[in-house]
Image (tube, rainbow, N blue to C red):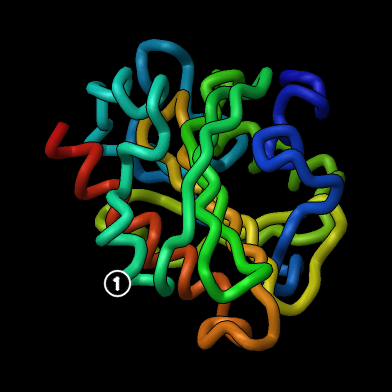
Amino acid sequence: MRPTATIMTLATLASIALLGGCADKKTNDPTSTSAPSSAGLPTAGAPSVTDPITNTKSVESDPCSAISADEMTAIAGKVKRTRSEDMTAGIACTWVFELSPNTINAGLVTANKDGLNALYAQHAAGSLTTFKPVDPISGYPAVVYANGGEGKGNCTLAIGVRNDLVYNVIPRLSNEHPSFADPCGLATKVAAAAIKNLKGA
């Protein structure tokens, strides 16, 4: 298992101290029906990614290209600006909305080479305060999780795009945002758009 500092990359990616969440951590792990990959993944009860996205280099280097401003506006509201942040966990994009102080941060967590398996292992070790496998997004397994910092308007969503790679989405919404009561629902829409564009890359 990789160290917690490596696996829990979302705080680094988003340059925030606390992780979002919107679900009860008491849930059963899903079981995988697929055989592990040649790299020894999945592990720890994590589901296998059966249709891995291999062409991710462009989004790894330019995370804001995963979703256009027009697409994001249709999903979450008028985008004021975007910015890329080069962090040790990978390069993330932050979409800043005209309705302040709402943001969505998302990107591929390239420093985590264990993908969703890392989160399942952390859950098994009892080191996460929220862990909830959710319905697959466009056919890709996903988990809502946090290591503290749960609160209204926050969500941390990880989607396995390969057995060894996740795409993370973190909305941080004020009570004026239409999705304030369901930030994980908004994160799911953002993830679906990103997956569609990643598969079309």
Which residue corresponds to the image point at 12% horizontal and 38% vertical from the top-left? 200
Q: Position of residue 137 (x, y in %)?
A: 34, 59
Q: Quadrant of residue 39?
A: top left
Q: Position of residue 17 (x, y in %)?
A: 85, 46
* Above/below status of 165 relative to 188: above
| Residue 168 visible in this rendered orientation of the protein | no
Judging depth in this view, the residue of 56 and 138 nearest the camera is: 56
Q: Residue at x 83, y 58 (%)?
A: 129
Q: Kindly state the secondary structure of the residue where label 1 is placed.
A: helix
Label 1: few (<14), some or many (≥20) within 10 Å?
Answer: few
Q: Position of residue 113 (x, y in %)?
A: 55, 19
Q: In terms of image quadrants, where is residue 71?
A: bottom left
Q: Identify the residue at horizontal 36%, vertical 12% (top origin).
A: 38
Query: Height in image: 88 above or below 18?
Result: above
Whether residue 17 sits left or right of residue 124 in the image: it is right
Residue type at mark 1 is Ala
Q: Position of residue 139 (x, y in %)?
A: 26, 54
Frontmost residue, 144 versus 55: 55
**Residue at the extreme top:** 39
| Quarter containing the C terminus | top left
Q: Residue at x 56, y 42 (%)?
A: 45
Q: Is residue 146 left or right of residue 112?
A: right
Left or right, 156 with reference to 50: right
Q: Which residue is mark 1?
A: 74
Going by the image, does 94 lie left or right of 127? left
Residue 5: tell me if it is visible: yes
